[in-house]
Image (cartoon, grey):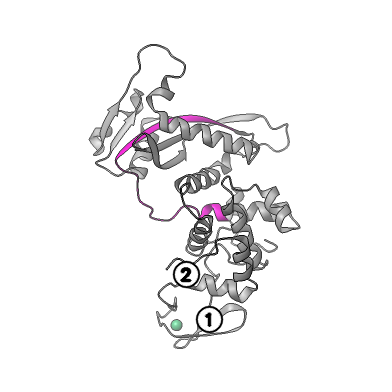
Amino acid sequence: MEDYPRTILELEERFPNEDACREYLMRLRWPDGFVCPRCRAKEAWSATRGRLVCRLCRRQTSVTAGTVFQDTHKPLRLWFRAIWQITSQKTGASAIAVQQVLGLGSYLTAWTWLHKLRRAMVRPGRERLKGCVEVDETQVGTAEDDTTEEPAKVKVLVVIAAEEDGRGIGRIRMARIPEASRSALHAFVQQTIEPGSVVHTDGRPAYRGLDGLGYEHEVTVLQGQEMDAAVKLLPRVHRVASLLKRWLLGTHQGAVRPKHLDYYLDEFTFRFNRRTSRSRGKLFYRLLQQAVHVDPAPYKAIVGGKDTGQPDHNL
Ligand SMILES: [Zn+2]
């Protein structure tokens, strides 16, 4: 049963304290009841700070261990409000907005939380797209990686797949690729599209050979040198590309660095694929549900440095 708050008032009433938050996470993490990670026993008693103690082997398990919330020193209530803030608005929220609304002392904390949550926006083992799917690449402008200089804009190549749904768009997938090479584009298609589907591309030679991989490859080539040829040929991916660019420039003010772009692509995809969801509360529910099933990412791993294995205190 999907049980979630529908309004901010319901959120406040539903999660007035840490116990209420933990109890909710427990039901999301163990929907069929608690199972001891060591001995698989199903009987446990509750200890302080939301820990469960296995009746058989006495192992202590915390509902947040092994999830996005592992090692957090901040109240879960604050996390729940951050998740509400980013799921209740169609365009999401920037780190600075989250910091301000929640009164977080540090911008870095807000930034790291958002990145941890973006990792939870991609459901492990999610289904691939199917039916007729348009695929094309686009250049996305990002901020330069070098923080010491005036941030020059650099272009990053993103490949987008969009399902055709009548005249509209179904689900999407996207990924950053180093170059529009045959190996990168074929790998993307195989990871994101179910074999047997129709893959619709332009005439770029790198797409050749998709029929050999179990796809029906539909190529459309427009005659002449019209500037907007690609837009006419593959209208759905280009609609998605322009929405993505607008979102990066608007909500995130073009400040996304290339090495972090993947996280933003995940967030955009999460939002886009749920854009018709009737209740924003349902997005809150989905994100929390995925957050308790995604491994924690240490701050160092998120910023692109080497994981030291140390917990992130203060985050
Ligand atoms: Zn046990």
Q: Name the residue type under label 2.
A: Arg
- Residue segment shown in magenta: 117-141
* Camera-nearest residue between 185 and 10: 10
Q: Is residue 46 above or below residue 309?
A: below
Quadrant for the C terminus, please: bottom right
The location of residue 190, given as percent across then percent down, is 33, 42
Q: Give the secondary structure at mark 2.
A: helix
Q: Give the secondary structure at mark 1.
A: strand
Residue position for label 1: 52
Judge the density around disc 2: few (<14), some (14-19), many (≥20) Cα neighbours within 10 Å.
many
Can residue 97 be seen in the rendering of this structure?
A: yes
- Give me the disc on residue 29: 2
Count of marks, rendered view: 2
Ligand 1 is found in which quarter of the picture? bottom left
Taking the image as shown, residue 192 lies to the left or right of residue 268, namely left
Can residue 178 be seen in the rendering of this structure?
A: no
